[in-house]
């Protein structure tokens, strides 16, 4: 593969936002990277999405419904777990790169009681959010930054809550993984930081989306009379919150650290103040489901000449895709080809590229069925090793989004994929 061909291949798959904007206007071309839902009911889209999540083991469990998935009643399978890990990595990258002075913590899932409690009472101590941990350790973190404002405390961890309105009527505790950032600043700059973080977070959510407009923001009054900003995603069954932003005044810290007022003061220029808090809280299981819904490409109601292109594809952003490359067998001596596949897979994994070892499957599968399987798994590239590889070192490389098959030398594959991922991460 020449340098020019490689570059053009990267550009085709990694669109700029402006290119993606114009492509979304041309509905009817099934090879483009956006969803085609013309004439398809929301119930149909929902059924396809949940069925695919179950069949391809993104989510484990029987009888998946929107309510049960959003309620934390199911476990994640291998692909869902890997994709969630990628979302968490991107969240941490956002925290680490967006601002200076963001400190990471990892607190206990159970709050420490002030006195002995019964088992039922101890159950109530399971944390429902990550705010308590950040506020509890504020003084220690303030000393680390030399008492200078603003600064942030970030954490990712499990939280627990009571699942309401289950069909069997049995109450149970749901789990969800939350990502939290508490940003401490003076009262006079608090609203500016709130607007900054809302803008920054909305851009982050949209960055990985095929259809960025599916993520939007709204606001409402909370129970305490303050304003809560919400980032939503438009699922097939309706709009759901994926992140909340709240502004808390200095009483949040004063109540947490009663009698320690002097230790709460931070330096804002020449002034010493008890800071206000901008609190961002993201539900990462909902983030996973939102990006799976966004990536679902299910063209229907096309003209007859496009029928051969009808396929369900998960066009997951390269940075979030759980599997980057599937390595499989073409025609040729199976034993020799498997040895080549094994060495190639080890080389790619050593470079941090996730690989699906399709060559280990002893059952012969027609190529089109194989491609359909990998498209539904969101696998970005399929590499076919064949007798041609043994003779000349050439591989067949298929792109998930374009379905274009190209030829690349085995010695160039790792460099190409590394370049591709680097370009995609900058979009």
Image: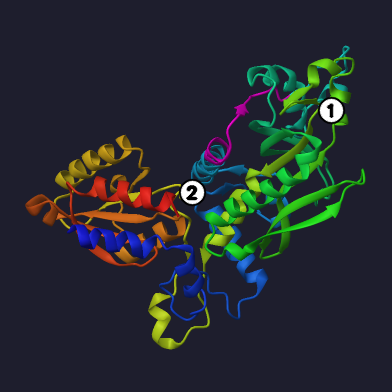
In the rendered image of this protein, does residue 18 appear above or below residue 67? Answer: below
Residue pictured at 58% horizontal, 48% vertical: 59
Q: Residue furthest bottom?
A: 304
Q: Which sits in the foreground, 65 or 182? A: 182
Confirm whether the magenta stretch covers residue 107: yes
- Measured from the top left, where is residue 91 in percent x and y? 57, 41
Find disc 2 in the rendering and name its residue: 320
Q: Which sits in the foreground, 55 or 302? A: 302
**Mark 2, residues whose alpha carbon is within 10 Å: few (<14), some, or many (≥20)?**
many
Residue pictured at 42% horizontal, 81% vertical: 307
Confirm whether the magenta stretch covers residue 425: no
Q: Tell me whether the residue at label 2 lies in contact with that at label 1, contact meaning CB atoms closer than 8 angstroms.
A: no
Q: Which residues are magenta?
A: 93-109
Q: Which sits in the foreground, 351 or 15? A: 15
The quadrant of the rendering that contains the N terminus is bottom left
Q: Is residue 411 left or right of residue 14?
A: left
Find disc 1 in the rendering and name its residue: 124
The numbered mark, 2 or 1, whose residue comes first in the sequence reads 1
- Measured from the top left, where is residue 179 in percent x and y? 65, 38
Q: Is residue 15 left or right of residue 89?
A: left
Is residue 383 among what the camera can see?
yes
Q: Residue furthest front?
A: 270
Q: Is residue 18 left or right of residue 160?
A: left
Q: Secondary structure at mark 1?
A: loop
Residue 223 badge? none
In the rendered image of this protein, does residue 127 appear above or below residue 210? Answer: above
In the rendered image of this protein, does residue 310 appear above or below residue 322? Answer: below
Quarter of image, res 247: top right
Quarter of image, res 211: bottom right
Colouring chosen for the image of the structure = rainbow
- Measured from the top left, where is residue 25 in percent x and y? 52, 78
């Amino acid at each position: 593969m020449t340098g020019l061909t490689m570059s053009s291949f990267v550009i085709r798959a990694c669109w700029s936002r402006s290119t993606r904007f114009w492509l979304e206007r041309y509905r009817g071309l099934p090879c483009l990277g956006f969803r085609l839902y013309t004439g398809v009911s929301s119930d149909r889209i929902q059924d396809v999405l949940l069925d695919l999540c179950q069949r391809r083991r993104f989510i484990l469990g029987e009888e998946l419904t929107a309510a049960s998935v959003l309620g934390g009643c199911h476990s994640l399978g291998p692909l869902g777990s890997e994709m969630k890990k990628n979302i968490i990595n991107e969240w941490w990258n956002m925290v680490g790169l967006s601002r200076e002075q963001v400190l990471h913590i990892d607190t206990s899932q159970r709050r420490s009681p002030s006195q002995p409690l019964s088992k039922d009472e101890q159950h109530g101590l399971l944390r429902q959010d990550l705010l308590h941990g950040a506020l509890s350790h504020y003084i220690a973190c303030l000393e680390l930054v030399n008492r200078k404002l603003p600064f942030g405390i970030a954490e990712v961890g499990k939280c627990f809550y009571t699942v309401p309105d289950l069909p069997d009527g049995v109450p149970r505790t749901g789990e969800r993984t939350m990502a939290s950032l508490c940003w401490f600043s003076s009262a006079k700059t608090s609203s500016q930081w709130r607007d900054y973080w809302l803008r920054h977070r909305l851009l982050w959510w949209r960055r990985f989306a095929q259809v960025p407009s599916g993520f939007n923001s709204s606001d409402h009054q909370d129970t305490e009379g303050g304003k809560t900003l919400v980032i939503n995603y438009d699922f097939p069954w309706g709009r759901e919150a994926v992140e909340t932003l709240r502004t808390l005044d200095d009483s949040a810290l004063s109540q947490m650290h009663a009698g320690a007022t002097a230790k709460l003061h931070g330096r804002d220029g020449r002034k010493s103040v008890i800071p206000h808090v901008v609190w961002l809280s993201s539900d990462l299981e909902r983030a996973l489901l939102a990006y799976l819904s966004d990536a679902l490409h299910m063209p229907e109601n096309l003209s007859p000449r496009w029928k051969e292109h009808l396929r369900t594809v998960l066009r997951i952003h390269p940075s979030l895709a759980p599997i980057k490359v599937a390595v499989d067998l073409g025609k040729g001596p199976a034993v020799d080809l498997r040895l080549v596949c094994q060495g190639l897979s080890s080389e790619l994994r050593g470079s941090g590229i996730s690989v699906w070892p399709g060559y280990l499957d002893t059952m012969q599968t027609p190529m089109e069925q194989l491609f359909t399987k990998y498209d539904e798994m969101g696998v970005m590239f399929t590499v076919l090793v064949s007798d041609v590889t043994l003779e000349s070192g050439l591989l067949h490389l298929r792109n998930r989004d374009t379905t274009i098959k190209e030829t690349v030398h085995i010695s160039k594959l790792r460099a190409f994929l590394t370049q591709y991922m680097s370009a995609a991460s900058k979009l």
